[in-house]
Structures are given as structure tokens and as C-alpha cells.
């Protein structure tokens, strides 16, 4: 089931924890799949910890706050990464109040 | 900006110092090197043999570069010094560069101790005016000949790195140089102060910056970039020479206010120096609108950036709602730790409609269908916000009431001070409030979005619905907001749906947006040009005689140039061309007297009483939408309006301007020239 906030978006966001590859988030016109493994990605979100990475995947992360705090940095296409991370926030049960 | 300070800037990096070039931050003197809403240097004081040199002169070379000429005082009335000092400072690329040159004009050798005191409080901009106890730890040390000042709070780290080309002893909070200058010779050192937001984070760009940083080199880039920026904009010539200076000043100040972010190519206008060097939705949108005929690229970046951070979830702390356009984004510590909601903050009720207005206006001017096509989802989401969140109670009007009662804005219209929405007798209107201009913006936004729906997004059904909604809104607005006994529209509907009956400049925005019926517009035009509202220099935010009127009240009596520029365009829209020209002339005359740079606001005293516009003490300068005001006024005077593939030119100039030409106006027509001659008798 596509995430409405990600419809129209296609690409891959890799999540690293430090220098270790953790997972890959694949977006296909809004459909989200989280897979293990590395590979080419449109952007990489480098997390400082497993907790940050988990929060990102679950949509509990405000990426701007995380970047400002130094818990997250981005490589590659930052606009794509931000769209994905902000879109994932809509998957939370409380996203629409 | 107090005259005792000088500043240089480039986007969200700026340095505020005293007139000698020293930084000595106090709660009242907000000196510093600022970047990303953080003060990276709060103390930077030059002494020579324990004495601070006195100022001879300042060369304001460019917005990013300044030169101070100083000398050591001798204790007499005359400057009979044998030692002079030059400090040349330029900002850019994560900090600033400073050359200090000492000249020994004596017959004897000079042995000197040069001391540069350096300290950083890493204050968030929200903390700058109040001395707030920091929650992290500060460090200072020497690393490979560099003075390193650091702040850490968990994973949050900020660092200032100071290097000198001449060897310096670093101790006791300062850099010490033991200098020996032969007779009639000079000594110099080049200092680099780097402000680093993410040290040790594997950020390649930041690491390179630490090793090879040179704001000195970036100064040359900025000079070239500025020349290209001005050269690429239309050329303005006028028989009223001050207008040429005002125009150039606007272009240069807009260049200075360009704010870049790594996620979106290009730059958008930050809101103003010193406290608003950030992405502000409303300010960036309006400034981009004003600048469209001149530097349309600002609008493209503004639209893309605001679309990227458009609201997606419900978050009462940040007042985020799906589809809502952001009010403000900040990058300092208080935002990082969510002590402030600016990550981003969405507390404005007008930015969403203004986003749609700019999107349409941008396409009308540039023909850039690719950008508009790419923002269809965001536009639809914005309309959804207007209908389902903006209208909080289903009465068909937009109203606001803050959800973040701790740190959110009480007023979420452009007049966002606490006392701006009042009745004629001065009584504060209870929330929720639906100010009149919000409804006008929505009306305009729906009509414009309908055009895009029809012509770009191929959705004629949606276009039809939007147009019906707009017509319905116009009818209801003209009934619900009109005050027949006073002959103007209410400032707002209050929490009890009463008409807030103060006479304010907001009615001019209704003409800009087109929501006012023709006869109502006529009455509003008379009020706007009356002595109560028009000071002779510009339109007051509130009419003289109203209960809360105060000529130096922030939103209740001062004149805001951007406000008058929008009103002038609105008058013109309804056919009041001479009135529009008269308003434009008042503001442009004021601009001349402000040394060609309009401030954010100035006092609303009557022109007859003052003979010159009176400064408003806490105004920002340069301020983006004040900088854009002359541009919109030039457009108004020349009557520039895109119509299909053509540019319509319909000038109406005040007599003192004489002749005005604007050459190489960019647009979907390529480049076009516009000419106008005054035919009025003043």
C-alpha cells in the first residue's frame, strides 16, 4: 500500500549506522520496502546509533532535529533523503491527529 | 540597527561589530559572528600595547567586506599618532577573514604587543538578548597552531577555529603577537575564523573547510558573483537619479540576503539582518513576488524549498498540519533540542495561500511549466490545508489560534505582534482571529490554482470547483467583513465572529488579491489615501485616530514599505493608477532620504510634522521585503503585467520621476524593454 506522502517518489535511501550499512529503504511511487543490504542509493542517511536508525525507519525522526543534534548526516541527494524521512513520519498512527 | 554597529553578511553568515571592528557581545550590544542561528564568536578585541585603537574611518566596501582605519590615540585632542592600523574583514564560506596591518610612521622602530582577545559563547539567536545558562560544555585549546573554541552538548557540537598567518602565542583567552616594525614599515597578519557546525562528523565538506578555509578567497567569488547578479538583472534608467541608486541598492541588498541550503539548488531571500537571517515562508514568498520581474530565480528556490518542508503530519508543538507551508526554520541549539519549535515552525496562517499565489505568478512570468508540474502534489496539499485546517470552524473563512501556547506566535498573520488585532477602541480581539487579508489571499490563491489546474495540470474539473469556491468566498467575504457605517472592511472577525472595526492597512491587501467588490474597493481606496492612513510617506499600518494608533507602534501605526508596495499594486489593479503612483512616490522619496535603503519600518508621523521620515528604533536593515518594495513599486509605475506570451506595459508615473525605463526584463517573452513618461501634474 503506497504511503500517500511518498506517492510520485521513487528511489533508494540507504541507512548506515556509523560506517556500517544497516538497511535500504526502497521507494517505488510511494510504496515503501525496507530491505537489508547495501548497494547503490540515491542518498545515504548516516545515523549515529541503532536507536536513531530505528526511529528513522519507523517515522519517529524529525530529520532536521537529528541533523542539528549531530545524530544524522546525509550524503547524496539531500532533497530525496528529506522527502523520504518526512514522508515516513506520516506512517505513524498519530500522524493525522 | 544602531549606528554604533556595522555588519557584513552573506546569506545566513554575518558579522556584527562595533565601529572599530571589535566584537564585544553583551545583552544590549549583539555583536558576533553568526552562522546557522548560532553565535560562533562573541568576543574579538584588538589591543596594541594594552590600548584599543580609535576609529578614523570605515570603508563600507561591499555587503560582505569592510575596512576599518584606526590609530592609537595619544591622549591629546589631535590624532598625533605614529601608528595606524587597518583591519580589512570579509565574510563568507563559514566564517570570516581579517587582515590586520600595522603601519609605523615614526623614525624609530616600534616594539609592540598585539593582542587579539577571542571567545565564543555559542549562543542560539533566541538566547542572544537574554543571558541564558548554557546546558553544554565549552572548551578552548590549541591544536596544531590553531585556537579551537568548542561547545558540546551530547552529540551536538559546534566549533570555532582561528588561525593566523603570523605565529601567535595563544594563552589567557587571546592571541599574542610580539611585533617589531622598523621605521616607516608595516607588519601584517591574516586571520581566518571558521565557524563549523558539524566537526568530526565525517562531513567531507566541513573537513575540507577546516583545513583550507579562506573567507578571503570567497570574498573574490562574492565580488564576481555580485557583479554577475547585478549585470543579469534589468537595467533601470530614470531622469530622477535617486531611483537608479535605490534600485541598485535593492539589487545589492537582495544579493546579500540570499540564503542557500544544501537540499535545494540556488538561493532564496532570507528575511532580514540581523535577527531574521533564516527561511521565513511569508517573507521569502512576498520578496520573491516583488522581485519576479527582476531576479525570478529567487522565486524558484523559494517555491522548491518551501515545498520540500511542507507540513505532512499533525504536530501541535510546531503547529504543523498536512499541506501547511512553513513559517520559519532555525538551525540553532534551541531548535536542535526542541526547546523552540522551529524545525520548522508552521505558525503562519497566510504562507500556504501565498505559496500558491507565487507559484502561479512565477509561471505567468517565466513559463517554467516543469517546476509547476513538479509541484502539483504540493499545490493540491496546500488547497487541502486551506479547506480542512485553515478553516478551523467550517464558516468558510481562514482563522488562526495557536496550538503551541508556550513558544508559538499568538498572531499568525503578517502583523504578528501581540497588540496588532484590536477594535477601533483599542480593545484586543479575542482568538481565534480571521484577519481580512487571509481571506483575500485564499481567494486569489484559488483563482490562480484554478488557472494552473486548467493550463498545466490538465484538471478542468478541479479548476471549475476552485473558481466556484473563489466566487462563493468573495460573495460571503464582502457580506461578512464589510462595515457599512465606516465604509471599509473589518480588520478581522474575532473569536465571537464580531467585526474587528479598526481601520488598518490590511484593506489594501484586499485590493491586491482582488476579493473586494468594486464599490467597496472605491471606498477603501479613499480611506487608504486619506490623511488618517497615508502619512505622506507611506500607508500607516493603522489609521491615526484609532484607539491603538501609535506612530511608533510596531504594527499599529508605523509604515512598512512592503505593505505600501502591495497596496499600491492593489490600487492599480482596481484602476486607481494615480493613487498608486502617489503612494509609490512617497515611499521612493523616503528611500532617498534613508540613503537609498528602505528599513523594515519607519515611524508613522505625518509628513508635514517631520519633513523627513523618522526612523523606527528596532527595525531590521537590510530587510528582504523592504528591499523588494522599490522593485514592486517600479513594476507598479510601469504597469508591468504578463499576459500570455506577452508583457503588457501600462505606465503611470508621478511627475517628479519624469522618465523611467527598465531594460531587458526577463520572462517567457525572452527579454523586453519598458518605458514610461510622467503625464501627471503634481
Image (cartoon, coloured by chain):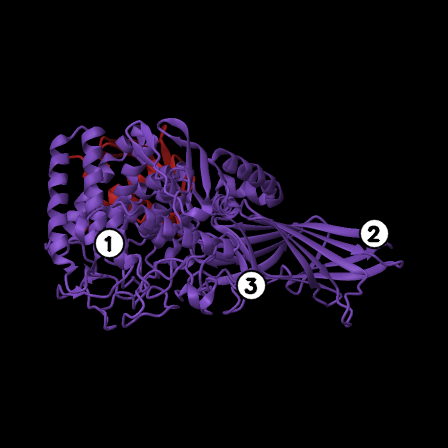
Q: CA distance from mark 2 to mark 3?
A: 34 Å
Image location of residue B86, percent across then percent down: 71, 54
Chain letter, colour red: A
Discs 1 and 2 share one subunit: yes
The numbered mark at residue B3 is 3
Residue placed at 24% from the left, 54% from the top?
Answer: B437
Q: Badges 1 and 2: C-beta atoms under 8 Å apart?
A: no
Circle count: 3
Question: Which is nearer the N-term, disc 1 or disc 3?
Answer: 3
Instruction: Tell me the number on the disc at residue B139.
Output: none
Colour of chain B as rendered: purple
On residue B185, which mark appears?
2
Depth order, front residue of B518/B130: B518
Quarter of the picture containing the N terminus of chain A is top left
Q: Secondary structure at mark 1?
A: helix
Q: Which residue is mark 1?
A: B437
Task: Specify whether B405 is left or right of B60.
Answer: left
Q: Is residue B620 left or right of residue B406?
A: right
Q: Nearer the viewer, mark 2 or mark 3?
A: 3
Name the one closer to the observer, B398 or B243: B243
Residue B518 in view here: yes
Give the chain of mark 2.
Answer: B
Amino acid at each position: 500500500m503506497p504511503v500517500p506522502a511518498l506517492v510520485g517518489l521513487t528511489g533508494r535511501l540507504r541507512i548506515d549506522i556509523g560506517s556500517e550499512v544497516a538497511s535500504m529503504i526502497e521507494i517505488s511511487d510511494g510504496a515503501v520496502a525496507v530491505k537489508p543490504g547495501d548497494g547503490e542509493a540515491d542518498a545515504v542517511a548516516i545515523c549515529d546509533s541503532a536507536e536513531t536508525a530505528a526511529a528513522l525507519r519507523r517515522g519517529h525522526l524529525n530529520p532536521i532535529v537529528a541533523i542539528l543534534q549531530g545524530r544524522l548526516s546525509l550524503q547524496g541527494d539531500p532533497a530525496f533523503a528529506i522527502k523520504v524521512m518526512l514522508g515516513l513520519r506520516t506512517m505513524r498512527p498519530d500522524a493525522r491527529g | 540597527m544602531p549606528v554604533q554597529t556595522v555588519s557584513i553578511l552573506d546569506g545566513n553568515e554575518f558579522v556584527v561589530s562595533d565601529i572599530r571592528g571589535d566584537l564585544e557581545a553583551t545583552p544590549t550590544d549583539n555583536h558576533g559572528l553568526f552562522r546557522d542561528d548560532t553565535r560562533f564568536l562573541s568576543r574579538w578585541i584588538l589591543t596594541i600595547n594594552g590600548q584599543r585603537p580609535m576609529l578614523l574611518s570605515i570603508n563600507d566596501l561591499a555587503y560582505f567586506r569592510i575596512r576599518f582605519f584606526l590609530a592609537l590615540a595619544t591622549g591629546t585632542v589631535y590624532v598625533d599618532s605614529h601608528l595606524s592600523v587597518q583591519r580589512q574583514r570579509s565574510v563568507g564560506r563559514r566564517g570570516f577573514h581579517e587582515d590586520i596591518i600595522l603601519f609605523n610612521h615614526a623614525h624609530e622602530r616600534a616594539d609592540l604587543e598585539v593582542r587579539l582577545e577571542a571567545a565564543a559563547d555559542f549562543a542560539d539567536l533566541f538566547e542572544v538578548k537574554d543571558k541564558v545558562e548554557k546546558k553544554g560544555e565549552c572548551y578552548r585549546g590549541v591544536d596544531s597552531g590553531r585556537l579551537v573554541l568548542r561547545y558540546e552538548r551530547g552529540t551536538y557540537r559546534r566549533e570555532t577555529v582561528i588561525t593566523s598567518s603570523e605565529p601567535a602565542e595563544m594563552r589567557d583567552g587571546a592571541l599574542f603577537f610580539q611585533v617589531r616594525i622598523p621605521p616607516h614599515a608595516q607588519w601584517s597578519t591574516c586571520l581566518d575564523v571558521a565557524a563549523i557546525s558539524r566537526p568530526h562528523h565525517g562531513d567531507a565538506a566541513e573537513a575540507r573547510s577546516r583545513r583550507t578555509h579562506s573567507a578571503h578567497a570567497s570574498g573574490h567569488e562574492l565580488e564576481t558573483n555580485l557583479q554577475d547578479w547585478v549585470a543579469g538583472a534589468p537595467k533601470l534608467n530614470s531622469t530622477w537619479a535617486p531611483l537608479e541608486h535605490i534600485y541598485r541598492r535593492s539589487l545589492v541588498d537582495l544579493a546579500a540576503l540570499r540564503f542557500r541550503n544544501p537540499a535545494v539548488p540556488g538561493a532564496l531571500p532570507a528575511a532580514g539582518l540581523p535577527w531574521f537571517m533564516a527561511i521565513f515562508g511569508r517573507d521569502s514568498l512576498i520578496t520573491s513576488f516583488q522581485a519576479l520581474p527582476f531576479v525570478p530565480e529567487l522565486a524558484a528556490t523559494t517555491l522548491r524549498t518551501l515545498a520540500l518542508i511542507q507540513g505532512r503530519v499533525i504536530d501541535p508543538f510546531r503547529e504543523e498540519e498536512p499541506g501547511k507551508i512553513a513559517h520559519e526554520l532555525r538551525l540553532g541549539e534551541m531548535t536542535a533540542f526542541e526547546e523552540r519549535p522551529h524545525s520548522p515552525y508552521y505558525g503562519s496562517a497566510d504562507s500556504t495561500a501565498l505559496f500558491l499565489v507565487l507559484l502561479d505568478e512565477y509561471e505567468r512570468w517565466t513559463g517554467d511549466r516543469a517546476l509547476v508540474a513538479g509541484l502539483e502534489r504540493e499545490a493540491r496539499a496546500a488547497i487541502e490545508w486551506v479547506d480542512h485546517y485553515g478553516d478551523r470552524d467550517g464558516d468558510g473563512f481562514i482563522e488562526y489560534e495557536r496550538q503551541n501556547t508556550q513558544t508559538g506566535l499568538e498572531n499568525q498573520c503578517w502583523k504578528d505582534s501581540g497588540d496588532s488585532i484590536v477594535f477601533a477602541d483599542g480593545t484586543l480581539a479575542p482568538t481565534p482571529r480571521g484577519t481580512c487579508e487571509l481571506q483575500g489571499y485564499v481567494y486569489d490563491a484559488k483563482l490562480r490554482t484554478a488557472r494552473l489546474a486548467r493550463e498545466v495540470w490538465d484538471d478542468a474539473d478541479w479548476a471549475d470547483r476552485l473558481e466556484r469556491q473563489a466566487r462563493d468566498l468573495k460573495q460571503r467575504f464582502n457580506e461578512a467583513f464589510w462595515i457599512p457605517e465606516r465604509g471599509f472592511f473589518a480588520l478581522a472577525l474575532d473569536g465571537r465572529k464580531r467585526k474587528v472595526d479598526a481601520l488598518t492597512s490590511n484593506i489594501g491587501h484586499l485590493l491586491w488579491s482582488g476579493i473586494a467588490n468594486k464599490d467597496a474597493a472605491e471606498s477603501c481606496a479613499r480611506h487608504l489615501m486619506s490623511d488618517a492612513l497615508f502619512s505622506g510617506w507611506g500607508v500607516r499600518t493603522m489609521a491615526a485616530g484609532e484607539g491603538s494608533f501609535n506612530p511608533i507602534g510596531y504594527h499599529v501605526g508605523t509604515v512598512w514599505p512592503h505593505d505600501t508596495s502591495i497596496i499600491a499594486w492593489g490600487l492599480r489593479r482596481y484602476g486607481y493608477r494615480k493613487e498608486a503612483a502617489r503612494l509609490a512616490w512617497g515611499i521612493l522619496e523616503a528611500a532617498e532620504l534613508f540613503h537609498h535603503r528602505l528599513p523594515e519600518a519607519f515611524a508613522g508621523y505625518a509628513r508635514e510634522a517631520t519633513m523627513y521620515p523618522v526612523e523606527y528604533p528596532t527595525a531590521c536593515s537590510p530587510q528582504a521585503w523592504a528591499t523588494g518594495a522599490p522593485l514592486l513599486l517600479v513594476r507598479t509605475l510601469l504597469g508591468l503585467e504578463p499576459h500570455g506570451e506577452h508583457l503588457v506595459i501600462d505606465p503611470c508615473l508621478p511627475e517628479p520621476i519624469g522618465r523611467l525605463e527598465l531594460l531587458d526584463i526577463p520572462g517567457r517573452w525572452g527579454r523586453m524593454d519598458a518605458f514610461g513618461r510622467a503625464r501627471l501634474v503634481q
